[in-house]
Image (cartoon, rainbow, N blue to C red):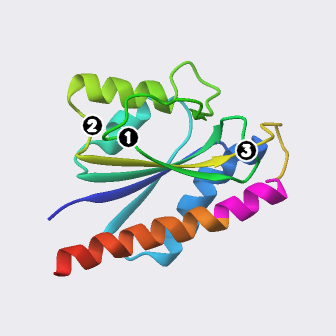
Amino acid sequence: MAVMRIIGIGNLFRGDDAVGLLAARRLRERLDSSVEVLEAEGDGLVLLDLMEGADQVMLIDAVKSGGHTGTTFRLDLSKESRWGKLVPCSTHAIGIAEAIDLARTLGRLPKRVMLYGIEIDSLESGAALSEPVRGGLDSIVEQVLKEIEGISCTKCI
């Protein structure tokens, strides 16, 4: 049976950077146990272990691309090797981009890896999620649920 895993990435104490973790928590409440929902805080290298054994991974993270705060992005990382203007946020030496590139190089990248990103504004310690990012959070949760539903329906045919 194919293993589908959602990994929310972020830091609850850094303002808008919490959005990936909060999305994972909302999704965990709405999904059954056939989809694994995990959280990742800290160094991006932890993603190598969290993705291990999964056929499909959906990563949710805060990004900075110079766009409007709250804008959502979807990027197929199984196909893309260039990030363009999209920069996942990291306060560590090794972030999500480096972890994905390393997994690809080592042959450890799952068959399908999607990044859902939300354009953020503030990484201020102790700050709450900004209003535009709250809207992006709602949008990302619905997008992920629709994608999972589409994958599940395809398997039924």
Against 107, residue 112 (above or below) is below
Dominant secondary structure of the residues highlighted in magenta in the image: helix
Q: How far separated are the C-alphas under marks 1 and 3? A: 20 Å
Of the residues shown, which amino acid type is indicated by label 1?
Leu
Q: Which of marks 1 and 2 is in front?
A: 1
Is residue 33 among what the camera can see?
Answer: no
Horizontal arrangement in the rendering, residue 128 relative to residue 93 (left or right): right
- Asked if the residues shown at circle 1 and circle 2 are in contact, with their CB atoms under 8 angstroms apart, the answer is yes
Q: Distance between the residues labelled 2 and 3?
A: 26 Å
Q: In which quarter of the image is residue 92?
A: top right
* Pointer 3 residue: 120
Amino acid at dot 3:
Ile
Q: Residues within 10 Å of mark 1 (few under 14, many from 20)?
A: many
Q: In screen coordinates, is 78 left or right of 140?
A: left
Quarter that holds the C terminus: bottom left
Residue at the outermost top position: 93
Which of the pair 147/10 is nearer the observer?
147
Which residues are the magenta region? 129-137
Say which amino acid is labelled 2: Leu
In which quadrant of the rendered view does residue 72 lie? bottom right
Q: Name the residue under label 1.
A: 77
- List the residue tagged with mark 2: 109
Instruction: Report, in whole angstroms, how far the alpha carbon at label 1 lies from the one at label 2.
Output: 9 Å
Instruction: Tell me, yes or no, whether the highlighted magenta stretch contains residue 99.
Output: no
Q: Is mark 1 on a helix, strand or loop?
A: loop
